[in-house]
Each structure stands twice: as structure tokens, then as C-alpha cells.
Image (cartoon, rainbow, N blue to C red):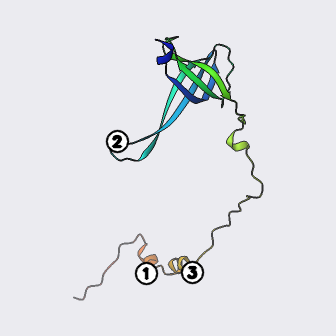
């Protein structure tokens, strides 16, 4: 493959846990053929990073190359910009001033009426004895 024909993409490093390999996500926008709405497309590439120079969140330029492994066909050409990513878990984030107190449920007038409007005759019907109906003979 000649150098002029190699594909070049710019993407963000989303994974750097492997040795000499990073996962780069490339995002682009295109118009849908039928609905004409602009749609975001994403692709993830396994990229060869021989010096382990790129870190999570970096923006990198990648270039197509010969197959290096089963899934790697790209290599890092250059690191364009680095981005600091805080390694915090969501439960560790505390926002001051946004305390939200949950008030106990209040009894509304409608629910009070429903509670008091129970039929009075039902309590008498709940006995285990069968009802004896008096029939005039």
C-alpha cells in the first residue's frame, strides 16, 4: 500500500490498558440517505502504539498500516493533544449546595376521604358463620 493511499483518521483514546496497543474511537457525522438527518457515527480501532506514549483521553492521529495482529491494522502517527481525565467514581462526587431533603408524604384531603368512606356493612359480613335468611312461610 503506497503512502499516499493510506487512510488517516483523528480520534480519541478510550482504552490504554494493553501493552503497545490503544483503543481509539473515531467519530464523524454524515447525512442519512433516506431521512436526510445528520447522524453521528462512531468506530473503534485497535491501534499500535509502540512507545506507549498515548494516554486515556488523548486526541491522536492514526494511519492505516499493514496487519500487525488479528485486529490491529492502524498505528499512532502522532499525539495531537493530551487531556487530563479525573479517575473518580460517580459515588465519590459530592456537589455542595444541592442537598435535597425528602419530605415525608403528607396526607391529602382526598386520601383522608377514601380512608373514611369505607362501607360500614362489610365488617358485619366478614363473620365465618353462614347467613341465615329468614323466609316468610
Provide the residue designation for mark 1: 121
Q: Which mark is residue 49?
A: none
Sequence order check: which comes first, mark 3 or mark 2?
A: 2
Residue 137 to residue 10: above or below: below
Which picture quadrant has residue 82?
A: top right
Left or right: 70 as drawn, with respect to 136: right
- Whole-Å distance between the Cαs marked 1 and 3? 24 Å
- Whole-Å distance between the Cαs marked 1 and 2? 69 Å
Q: Nearer the viewer, residue 14 or 27?
A: 27
In the image, which is nearer the foreground, mark 1 or mark 3? 3
Picture residue at 46% right of the left edge, 76% below the top: 123
In the image, which is nearer the foreground, mark 1 or mark 2? 2
Left or right: 109 as drawn, with respect to 2: right
Picture residue at 43% right of the left edge, 77% below the top: 122
Provide the residue designation for mark 3: 109
Q: Circle 1 — which element?
A: loop
Q: Which mark is residue 33?
A: 2
Q: Position of residue 137 (x, y in %)?
A: 21, 88
- Which residue lies most toward the left here? 137
Q: Position of residue 93 (x, y in %)?
A: 73, 45
Amino acid at each position: 500500500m503506497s503512502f499516499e493511499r493510506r487512510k488517516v483518521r483523528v480520534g480519541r483514546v478510550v482504552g490504554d490498558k494493553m501493552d503497545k496497543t490503544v483503543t481509539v474511537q473515531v467519530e464523524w457525522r454524515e447525512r442519512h440517505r433516506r431521512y436526510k438527518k445528520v447522524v453521528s457515527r462512531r468506530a473503534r480501532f485497535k491501534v499500535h502504539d509502540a512507545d506507549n506514549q498515548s494516554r486515556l483521553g488523548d486526541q491522536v492521529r492514526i494511519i492505516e498500516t499493514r496487519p500487525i495482529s488479528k485486529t490491529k491494522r492502524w498505528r499512532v502517527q502522532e499525539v495531537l493533544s493530551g487531556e487530563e481525565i479525573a479517575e473518580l467514581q460517580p459515588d465519590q462526587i459530592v456537589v455542595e449546595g444541592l442537598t435535597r431533603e425528602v419530605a415525608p408524604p403528607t396526607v391529602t384531603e382526598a386520601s383522608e376521604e377514601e380512608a373514611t368512606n369505607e362501607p360500614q356493612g362489610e365488617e358485619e359480613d366478614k363473620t365465618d358463620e353462614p347467613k341465615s335468611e329468614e323466609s316468610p312461610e
